[in-house]
Amino acid sequence: MLNRYLKIKLALFIALFCLFYATQNLFNLQSAHWFVSSTLAMEGHELYPGHFGPAISSPTVAWIALWIIIVLEYLAAAFALKGAWAMWQARKEPSNVFQDSKYYVMASAGVALFIWFGLFSAVGGAYFQMWQTEAGTGALQGSFWYFAGIALVALFINQQDSRV
């Protein structure tokens, strides 16, 4: 039972994590837009100035990208909350029922990994070369911490529980 309570608490922390980042982006909307805009435009790329694909300098595209990030962060938070509640309701049920209750937490982790590994690390880091700027390096380091932590927590949560 202890593991089940721990898994429920960790699911809540995933929800809070995603909720806090989405809300911080809203409270710092202009700064967040500046960051996304400068990343998409590949500003400050003196180390590797050549690129195989185009930079994107459209403010509209930057706003769309930022809103996609924020909506996905809120979606991940909502999934984790829904999953934590489902796990709470199934905490005293047989193992297979509790395992099934983890569906939305795992969906939340999937969305979070899409954001911080897919969008930030793969697209932002590899394609848009975020590592070439100070702000981009910090964001890449942060995104690694985020997706690594969420991946580890998701692996723990998804482990089968053999008893109540």
Image (tube, grey):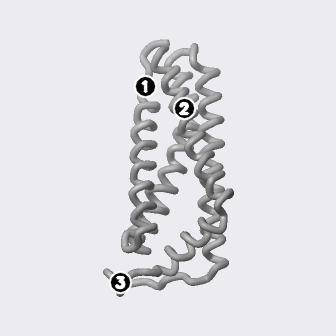
Q: Earlier in the sequence, mark 1 or mark 2?
A: 2
Q: How many marks?
A: 3
- Look at discs 3 and 1 and give the one toward the viewer: 3
Q: Are marks 1 and 2 in contact (CB under 8 Å)?
A: no
Q: Nearer the viewer, residue 91 or 61?
A: 61
Q: Nearer the viewer, residue 137 or 64?
A: 137
Q: Are marks 3 and 1 in contact (CB under 8 Å)?
A: no
CA separation, marks 3 and 2? 46 Å
Report the residue at 41% width, 69% height from top.
134
Secondary structure of the residue carrying numbered label 3: loop
Q: Quadrant of residue 93?
A: top right
CA separation, marks 3 and 1? 49 Å
Secondary structure of the residue carrying numbered label 1: loop
In the rendered image, which residue does mark 2 sit on? Answer: 102
The three-letter code of the residue at mark 1 reads Gln
Q: Is 95 left, or right, of 24 in this rendering?
A: left
Residue 44 x %, y %: 43, 80
Q: Is 153 left, or right, of 60 in this rendering?
A: left
In the rendered image, which residue does mark 3 sit on? Answer: 46
Q: Earlier in the sequence, mark 3 or mark 2?
A: 3
The three-letter code of the residue at mark 3 reads Glu
Q: Quadrant of residue 11?
A: top right
Q: Is 147 left, or right, of 102 in this rendering?
A: left
Mark 3 closeness class: few <14, some 14–19, many ≥20 residues within 10 Å: few
Residue 90 x %, y %: 60, 20
Q: Which mark is residue 160?
A: 1
